[in-house]
Image (spheres, coloured by chain):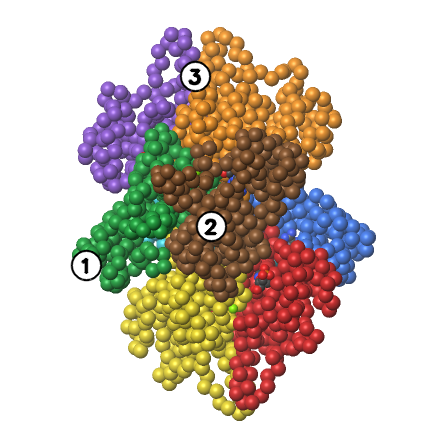
Chain colours: A brown, B yellow, C red, D cyan, E blue, F purple, G orange, H green
């Protein structure tokens, strides 16, 4: 595949039978397989027909690697930042996707704009990250604050967690698009997958260009 | 008047002649007069017919006190916080309104969520305030951050400053309504007047209840 | 905690097991504990592991005080005003939160703008309140009417009760933000907790400043 | 014409020349002519070509009656209620339209929900009206309050007067559609004409059915 | 009651027990009782405690008249117009409400703008009506077409029946507010009750003014 | 060009100089040239540099045919229907575009849903049309009514003509998308060009398939 | 029927019993019958009372032809294009409707804008189509891309498939209305029926005009 | 500065005098200065007080480098892709910003989704880019198509260019957020600056990590 990344199944709206069939078809290609938005029921259907498939029920991800091609990770890491329990599924979807695509992840959870000290305590981790995913529901202010503290690219993910004038995530989406901090780009509401993919893409491009040069110097890069 | 506060003129949409006429009528009552959203043209019309009226062309406020009843200020202060130049007219409308109603104002300008250190430098001022007005356009995240740092009531004012998905202030309005910091209430977009009035109301209620007790103890309060 | 108010749990979206675990953890700190948006099922989980926790199934609040630190109330009161049955859960969330934070509450229920006499009958109570919470669904006109009748700060709470062009509470939210009565600030749709917290904050600031002076005069305030 | 009401010109978007031409054509039919949303420039163009046309520059109405058919008014009246200066053009458009269609109008201006006493002072007029038009911008709460006080049908007109979350009149429009008072129906934002027409229609239907009976009894009704 | 109409219970959101309790309380006043938005379960609860209460499960109305005060109807009628099956519950809510309030109803169903001949076939009925309620979902064009054909006041009711860009009734609501036919006013989406009430109010005002005159002439009107 | 239709210039947002330059460049290709949304100023710039360019200032179209390739029209016609003066520019943009692309146009103007007889008078023309464009502002009900009366495909064009809850054309756009008449498809608000193009495309496809057969039978079609 | 097309039942919101009754009534007319948005339960109810009715549970269509009038298809075809599994129900509703109305359908599924080669592989099919239906959820970009590649009229159908800022189909609806490719018209979200009907209408008009001429030449067309 | 990038002035809403003053102040720091959204009038004010400031009136950017610190560019490039004339100001703002921050730019203009061949002709350039900015108004489909063709991160910028249901850029914004191509992140409507900054950030992070390694190997990188 052109992107060098494996095909990914978007399971939402598929029947368990359809999901299992597509999963098996992609396994047959001999490359790693990821499925997102997988319900417990869909996961069971897949695991019934093929062993060694890993299901993460918070992230709602199904992951599989061919035995002859175990997962390898590139140097450096992606940070995934969020405020709390309610945003965890989206944060974990982002983290699990980035890991699947070869980027180690540092989780910086339980930090929020209403308790800045917890965020500031984690600054040294954030400043070492190759790319930073910030997941936020409620008012969605966290990416602006993080963006102002770091120089790595920030991928902001609004979540649908909130009520009333939250409008199922439109409120934090607008917040993030209007961020006063430069260095922030945005993906769709609840799109943890998209953010994980984008951060891994940035991370890979940093490492690959290094490796390209390495290759030019006769070395054999891991990925 | 029931509220103990003077009548206020909302000049927007009135002709200069109408504005001057209403201003004079209220002056005749012998109480201080405030007009908001006053254009230079309206201000000239008023100042032509009555001397000693003070016009603030940033805040777009016209203020007048009867000679026999000069302005007095209550102890303590209201803090007015904002990020920068573009929000100044709204911040000054809030500040000027609060001052007119007897609350001294400390201005904490040029602080924004993308540069937290400038905000944190001002923390000691913020923590002494009786009430805090936070004015913000763009993504409107400032009230949440301030609300998390202080225990005084925060009055949040979204401004129409921004572009694109800012929707003329709807974006920061939604941000503020969804604030994850408790202790934040919101007024209409660009409603500096409403915020200044509300903060002065809180401030007065704090001081007055003190004074009521003082009165019960035989003292004669200033206001 | 900086605010002097106990930590509060937002139970919505948490499992019963998570809720009980967090509740116990906060109890261990020896301070009063409040949880909001608590379902009957979550309440059972908490009450199973810890005695003496009070559940209010209209307000959906769980409250607990350490035996050695029973609830004390400050002088004065917060008024909670609403039109009727459908708004009761939000009104009670506001009332219960304010009480938990030490503010006695006077409930002024069953008053609405289409039956003004019932509201006017309660005017003497409203005019004595230290702060007034007005909860309204439908067209959300009540805060403007109340705001025009009193001089205490009004905290307006739109509710999601209505249908059609009510847009799940956006209609009364907009009404309240556009209030022609000065002295009205607004919290999120259905955010009874936020209103109760805000009103208690105002109330406390009025009494505390009094008490500060009292303390300066050598007295030992209750709270 | 089927409705028994004269043809009416909606001048908005027409050139002065077009407006004058259409006006003259309708005059030729020998019936009264009304044009709405008429600018001063359009009015001049009409008045230049035909005498005795009355222009009201607040209501932006042009009115003409054939000499042989002077205006007659039916018994009873329509009340037009509004809060203030800014809503006057819409209120006057409503009033002028109703008058043109034969309904006398009582103006009840300068009443608003934040100053209930002024409204209540006018209750006896309101309770005598055959139909009531209530014009309101800002939060649009006035029709609900009036609707709760009277038993005549209320025609509510939201205006585009306001700012911020007012959304050019959508806020009071939603308020009025969600009115908790039964007996309120709504027309488009700023549609003073539509309200005046509707109220006159109701008024006429009340009087006409009376007159029909009178006719059956051999009397010759005025209209 | 000021309006001369009985109190009405809005059952939506009430428990069966609450509904029955309120229903009985109002019966005790000796006046007719109407409840709207009544589920089968709520109806059972009421019918269990009080006999002779009539439930209409399409209109979702519960109606009761005191034995000593059977329903009487005024002369003339209200027409209720709609396109089809899906709009029937709202149309019947309107019809049932108007009937309860003393206005006979002529139902003109199964007419729609895409089949004009069926509408035109009913023109003679429509032109005799004292007031006309037009209920429409989909694109909501029917009130404009009817309004252009008749001279009685039209009360337009948008319904939430539709899908996609229908936005749960906002589409026909906007259509109706923008009606190019004068003589159309609008109530909230699905508010059959409000439309029935408004039409009965108009109808009553036509008949009552007649009767007032009759009374002045010594006759004893039916209602 | 693949579509067999000439290139078209969208002049909006271009400077007069840019417009003239692009116009000349396309003329050089020897094919007819159309520019839409052309201001008088842009038209002057084009006409200054190249003769024989026709400007229609209602439709805001500039049209040019190479001398050796004069315009030919296909048999049959497209009907363009609209209610009145205000919609004329959009209707004429549609008509002028269709004509430019070889479809004769019958204009059916001054028909509206509030005066059905005028529409019905034109039924025989409408029923002969190969395709029908219906342009409507206000409530946008006309396409549904026309769609119910004819069997040709209807292309509906909402216009931005209206005020208040018209939302610059969103109201009639929604109306048209929800049309209860099958056989109606919609283009963007004010997109007369798009409707004219689409109708001409349908018309051409009808005639061309005929001609294809004719060609197969050895005839030489005009276009 | 005027359109020459059979009556069609919109089953959504009808009870199984109602659906079966209407279906039988239309069968009695001796013409083919189509019902759309039919649930399995409704389908059972119809199939219980009348044999030989075909149910497609993906398209949710019920179809029946009178024995003496079997389905005939016109020459040429309509192409139905979509990206994948989730859009299939809408695509099949469109396809099944067009087939029912006599247009053969070529399905071009599993093509999307993020994998252009699959679309380009199908170009020869698309370029032969008499009309093209493009169904798309997500960002809705497919109709613009297809529209740029072909000269047949494109009927675009947005679907409600997506999440977050997809707004239940509003996002692709807006995309399609703003298409930069001329030759695209749009129907309501998920309105596969409307698109199938519209494409068949275009297709029939192409063939019929041919046949009309044939008839004039003495031939007997198939349909 | 933490980000290693110079301070940038957002000139919108500032007076010419304010702009010049801020510009000079930043020059005094001896680092390069960029101002965005600069009008001709503001540019004149700056150029009057300081020489050698470069103004780009399409991009509306003012740029200055200290004589002793001329601009240096990193290896590789950012591609900026857009469809045409109307999007040029935003595309040039993006390009000029990226260049200012040290990233060479390849412009791929005049490509749009309705003419895929022009885009595909440029594929080899796109596939060599370190990051790709795609600017699009109208329906905003271009980023999805580009994202499907390349593996570099795509930064999508919706523009406010369009009309009708374009909603000043909301339509393409939603399109981009719902992109079916992974590897696309979005910035605010018309935010060319934000996109240029973000792309340069990614580009720098790719090169810097390379250089870091170089440094570890004893080389002295240019930037
Ligand atoms: N959670 C997600 N949200 C949006 N897109 C996704 C998600 N997961 C996977 N995708 C995209 O969906 C495509 C597969 O869709 P499908 O063919 O329906 O399985 C993949 O190529 C991904 O780019
Ligand atoms: N009903 C409520 N609505 C909004 N915020 C709340 C509510 N109840 C509690 N909170 C806030 O939520 C915070 C706790 O969130 P959590 O950590 O998820 O339990 C508290 O500090 C409160 O400020
Ligand atoms: N379907 C309805 N929609 C809106 N308001 C209603 C409806 N039915 C009754 N009402 C109003 O609701 C009031 C009673 O509300 P409640 O006190 O909650 O029963 C009545 O006075 C009616 O004006
Ligand atoms: N009024 C219009 N509205 C929308 N698109 C148009 C309009 N007029 C022309 N176009 C399209 O705009 C394209 C030309 O755009 P441009 O290259 O900017 O001149 C043409 O191919 C047409 O499809
Ligand atoms: Mg940063
Ligand atoms: Mg706080
Ligand atoms: Mg007040
Ligand atoms: Mg009333
Ligand atoms: Mg009428
Ligand atoms: Mg038709
Ligand atoms: Mg095409
Ligand atoms: Mg890609």
Q: Same chain, marks 2 and 3?
A: no
Disc 2 packing (10 Å; few <14; some 14–19; many ≥20):
many
Cα separation, mark 2 vs mark 3, equals: 62 Å
Residue G217 in the image: x percent, y percent?
46, 8
Q: Which mark is residue A77?
A: 2
On the question of residue C44 being in view, the answer is: yes
Left or right placement of residue B189 versus residue A8 in this view: left
Disc 3 packing (10 Å; few <14; some 14–19; many ≥20):
some
Residue ID at (32%, 68%): B57
- Say which chain tag 3 marks: F
Residue depth check, mark 1 versus mark 2: number of the one nearer the observer: 2
- Say which chain tag 2 marks: A
Cα separation, mark 1 vs mark 2, equals: 44 Å
SS of the residue under disc 1: loop
SS of the residue under disc 2: loop
Which residue corresponds to mark 1? Answer: H50
Which residue corresponds to mark 3? Answer: F209
Q: Quadrant of the N terminus of chain E?
A: bottom right
Q: Same chain, marks 1 and 3?
A: no
Seen in the picture, residue G89 relative to F211 is either above or below; the reply is below
Residue depth check, mark 1 versus mark 3: number of the one nearer the observer: 1
Of F93 and H84, the residue lying toward us: H84
């Amino acid at each position: 595949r052109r992107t060098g990344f494996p095909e990914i199944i978007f399971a939402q709206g598929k029947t368990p039978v359809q999901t299992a069939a597509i999963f098996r078809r992609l396994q047959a290609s001999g490359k790693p397989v990821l499925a997102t938005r997988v319900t417990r029921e869909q996961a069971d259907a897949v695991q019934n027909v093929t062993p060694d498939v890993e299901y993460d029920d918070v992230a709602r991800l199904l992951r599989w690697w061919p035995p002859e091609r175990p997962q390898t990770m590139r140097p450096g890491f992606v940070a995934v930042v969020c405020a709390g329990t309610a945003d965890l599924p989206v944060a974990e979807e982002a983290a699990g996707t980035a890991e699947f695509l070869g980027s180690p992840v540092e989780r910086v959870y339980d930090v929020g704009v209403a308790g800045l000290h917890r965020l500031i305590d984690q600054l040294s981790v954030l400043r070492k990250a190759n790319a930073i995913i910030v997941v936020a529901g409620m008012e969605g202010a966290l990416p602006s604050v993080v963006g102002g503290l770091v120089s790595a690219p920030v991928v902001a993910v609004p979540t649908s967690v909130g009520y009333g004038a939250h409008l199922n995530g439109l409120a934090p989406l607008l917040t993030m698009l209007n961020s006063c901090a430069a260095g922030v780009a945005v993906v769709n509401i609840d799109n943890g997958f998209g953010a994980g993919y984008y951060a891994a893409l940035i991370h890979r491009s940093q490492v690959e260009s290094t490796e390209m040069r390495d290759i030019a110097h006769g070395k054999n890069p891991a990925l």
